[in-house]
């Protein structure tokens, strides 16, 4: 009796071992990813959710293969609150260092929300030699610094869109507006942060070279919520296009104010609160006609990129329909991809040694939620118009009855840009 | 451009006056600088939003509940917290500031940080005034600002509570000797000031979104306007609002919107250097003359 009981337990044990090898892999020492970001921002919140989802998926498949051993992934976040006005850079950096010292991560994913924090973090990252994959902050100054001092900053990478690529996308849309509607006068309104200023100034240069008139260029501090002075000037100068570049929560009100004042100009740019799928409801239909950007696909599934469709559906299953609909226009896709990119690099490197991971990251070539992921020499993922060759962002237009219609680039466009009713 | 400055300067001035008048009223009567004012302002916005969004109450009902609830909270806070530190200026400031920060950070902790927190316009639409577009909400703000000033004048000159307000504001000891109850009057002044923060929030917040940092901005505005005009003087508040309101609009039109906030700080420094009591203030009048 005792013998048969022992044999039964042994059989059960062996069956479990064969059927669930991953549970044993998870007993190994975990690989730790640190996620220091602005968790209170919609981009940071969604990015962190996407990262947790990716970690769960990888662990469900047995973890990350490192040097012949499968090891589970663990991700720890810390809220840097850097999206809030008045938070000193030093406070955000202290949070980053706290995470590094307490959780001892092997790599950082998602990373800084604000470009100013990203730039200030670079020395910290170099000091701790941590592979760092940024998925939100967008300043091109990051790449410049990496190229200038490669040996020091080689640990820094970015897989989200940067301001240079955003300008390229905006140029494409502006070219279409000029050709289709004869527009040639724009008014640029940006928030006073590195990435937004860089985007606005980059676009301004393009306008000047392409026979457009820039009727005005205004910068608003973080937290500002009255844009009426700019809107009055837009009206007085008869601008045909307003180009807003904002990621702060208050910026959604720019659109509401423009409609309230009946400004006869097309809003075409990036207003973060107007990107999610519930913006029509939140702004009571006043978003109609606005052309907004999704910096990276994923929040809108694109059939040409199956991973984007899969991500979008799985996000809904994991977190619920409301969070899926509310996915922000910047960050979730790259944040999700960042876990896979880093895990893939660790596997190829076969070690957790930072320099080896950096070398492997530089050779990354994989298909992700945002399209094809490859790093340029300056450690920025290449964005373009064909997801088979590059990563992809897209522009969409809000149309009745509250749907986001992709309008650019052509490969994913489902319709042409239409003039909103108040401009006809 | 000139007509835009005239129209929007007036709107901006009334917004500043609406924000500052509750803070000034409480200080003028009880001497309490209510540094929880930004917290009351934001609480009013979120409370109205919750009443509208979750309870589905009619707008006007939500407005009256909010004004009443926030006023009552101000009244209770006097009895529960401020009564114990009354007269110790530093303790009053620390207590109210801590309370205000606590209120603001509570909302941050509970996740009231995204773009979805907006209050509806009273009425959608716009008018052209001298070819300058002005939405109805801004016109409502002007009307509410004027009505509030008129109400305050009538209230303080023709009601018993108003007389006791003025009595305590003029000379607390004499007022007490005449039978005016100091603590009750001070508590009522805090209730009135808080209710006015609610009126300001419900009128102004539809123009923007309800965000945590706005609580801090509102306190800065109330203090800046108070310092320039004279903290305890209602006419001073009105004049200071006009000066700062127009200065801000001129700055945004001719320099850049990012410099608008600097106007407050520059005005505070300038007035404190030249006339520390403010344009109409009397607190340090004697020292200034000496």
Image (spheres, coloured by chain):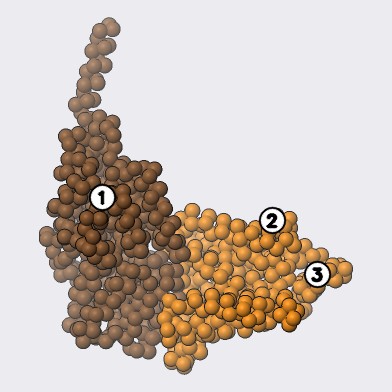
Q: Chain of mark 2?
A: B
Give the percent coordinates (x, y) of residue B24. 66, 73
For residue A47, what is the image quadrant?
Answer: bottom left
Mark 2, Cα crowd under 10 Å, few <14 / some 14-19 / many 20+, is some
User: In the image, which lettered chain appears brown?
Assistant: A
Q: Which mark is residue A131?
A: 1
Rendering quarter of residue B1: bottom left
What residue do we see at 35% from left, 60% from top?
Answer: A120
Chain painted in orange in the figure: B
- Quarter of the image for residue B265 reads bottom right
Q: Is disc 2 on the same chain as disc 1?
A: no
Judge if badges 3 and 1 mark residues of a common chain.
no
- What chain letter is assigned to the residue under label 3? B
User: What residue did someone put label 2 on?
Assistant: B81
For the residues carrying marks 3 and 1, which lies nearer the camera in this image? 1
Q: Estimate the x, y position of residue B12 in percent, counting from the top left.
A: 52, 81
């Amino acid at each position: 009796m005792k013998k048969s009981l022992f044999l039964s337990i042994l059989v059960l044990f062996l069956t479990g071992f064969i059927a669930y090898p991953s549970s044993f892999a998870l007993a190994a020492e975990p690989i730790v990813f640190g996620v220091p970001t602005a968790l209170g921002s919609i981009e940071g919140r969604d990015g962190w959710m996407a990262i947790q989802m990716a970690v769960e998926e990888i662990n469900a498949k047995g973890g990350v293969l490192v040097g012949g051993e499968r090891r589970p992934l663990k991700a720890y976040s810390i809220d840097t609150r850097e999206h809030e006005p008045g938070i000193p850079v030093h406070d955000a950096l202290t949070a980053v260092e706290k995470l590094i010292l307490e959780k001892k991560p092997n790599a950082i994913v998602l990373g800084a929300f604000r470009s100013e924090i990203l730039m200030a973090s670079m020395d910290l990252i170099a000091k701790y030699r941590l592979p760092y994959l940024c998925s939100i902050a967008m300043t091109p100054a990051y790449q410049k610094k990496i190229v200038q001092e490669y040996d020091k900053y080689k640990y820094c990478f970015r897989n989200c869109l940067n301001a240079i690529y955003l300008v390229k996308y905006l140029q494409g849309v502006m070219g279409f507006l000029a050709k289709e509607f004869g527009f040639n006068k724009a008014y640029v309104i940006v928030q006073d942060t590195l990435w937004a200023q860089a985007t606005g100034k980059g676009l301004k240069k393009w306008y000047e070279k392409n026979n457009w008139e820039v009727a005005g260029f205004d910068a608003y501090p973080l937290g500002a919520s009255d844009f009426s002075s700019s809107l009055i000037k837009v009206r007085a100068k008869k601008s045909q296009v307003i180009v807003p570049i904002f990621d702060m929560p208050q910026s959604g009100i720019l659109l509401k104010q423009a409609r309230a004042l009946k400004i006869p100009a097309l809003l075409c740019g990036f207003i973060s609160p107007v990107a999610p799928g519930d913006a029509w409801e939140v702004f009571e239909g006043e978003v109609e006609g606005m052309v907004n950007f999704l910096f990276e696909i994923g929040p809108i599934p694109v059939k040409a990129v199956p991973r984007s469709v899969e991500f979008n559906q799985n996000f809904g299953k994991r977190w619920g329909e409301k969070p899926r609909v509310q996915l922000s226009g910047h960050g979730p896709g790259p944040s999700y991809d960042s876990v896979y990119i880093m895990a893939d690099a660790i596997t190829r490197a076969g070690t957790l040694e930072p320099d080896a991971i950096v070398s492997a990251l530089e050779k990354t070539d994989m298909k992700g939620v945002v399209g094809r992921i490859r790093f340029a020499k300056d450690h920025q993922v290449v964005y373009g118009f064909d997801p088979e060759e590059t990563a992809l962002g897209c522009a969409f237009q809000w149309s009745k009855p509250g749907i986001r219609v992709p309008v650019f680039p052509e490969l994913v466009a489902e319709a042409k840009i239409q003039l909103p009713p108040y401009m006809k | 451009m000139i007509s835009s400055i005239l129209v929007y300067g007036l709107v901006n001035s009334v917004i500043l006056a609406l924000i500052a008048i509750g803070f000034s009223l409480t200080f003028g009567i009880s001497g309490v600088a209510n540094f929880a004012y930004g917290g009351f302002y934001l609480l009013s916005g979120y409370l109205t939003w919750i009443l509208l969004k979750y309870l589905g109450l009619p707008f006007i009902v939500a407005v009256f509940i909010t004004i009443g609830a926030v006023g009552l909270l101000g009244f209770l806070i006097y009895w529960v917290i401020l009564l114990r530190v009354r007269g110790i200026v530093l303790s009053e400031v620390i207590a109210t500031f801590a309370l205000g920060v606590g209120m603001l950070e509570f909302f941050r902790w509970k996740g009231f940080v995204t773009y979805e927190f907006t209050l509806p316009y009273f009425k959608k639409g716009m008018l052209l005034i001298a070819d300058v577009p002005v939405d109805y909400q801004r016109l409502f703000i002007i009307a509410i600002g004027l009505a509030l000033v008129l109400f305050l004048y009538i209230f303080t000159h023709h009601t018993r509570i108003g007389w006791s307000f003025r009595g305590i504001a003029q000379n607390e000891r004499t007022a007490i000797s005449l039978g005016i109850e100091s603590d009750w009057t001070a508590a009522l002044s805090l209730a009135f000031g808080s209710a006015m923060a609610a009126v300001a929030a419900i009128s102004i917040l539809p123009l923007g979104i309800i965000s945590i940092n706005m609580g801090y901005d509102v306190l800065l505005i109330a203090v800046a306007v108070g310092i320039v005009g004279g903290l305890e003087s209602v006419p001073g508040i009105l004049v200071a609002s006009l000066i700062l309101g127009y200065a801000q609009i001129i700055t945004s039109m001719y320099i850049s919107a990012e410099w608008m906030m600097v106007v407050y700080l520059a005005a505070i420094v300038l007035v404190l250097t030249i006339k520390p009591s403010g344009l109409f203030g009397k607190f340090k009048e004697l020292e200034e003359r000496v």
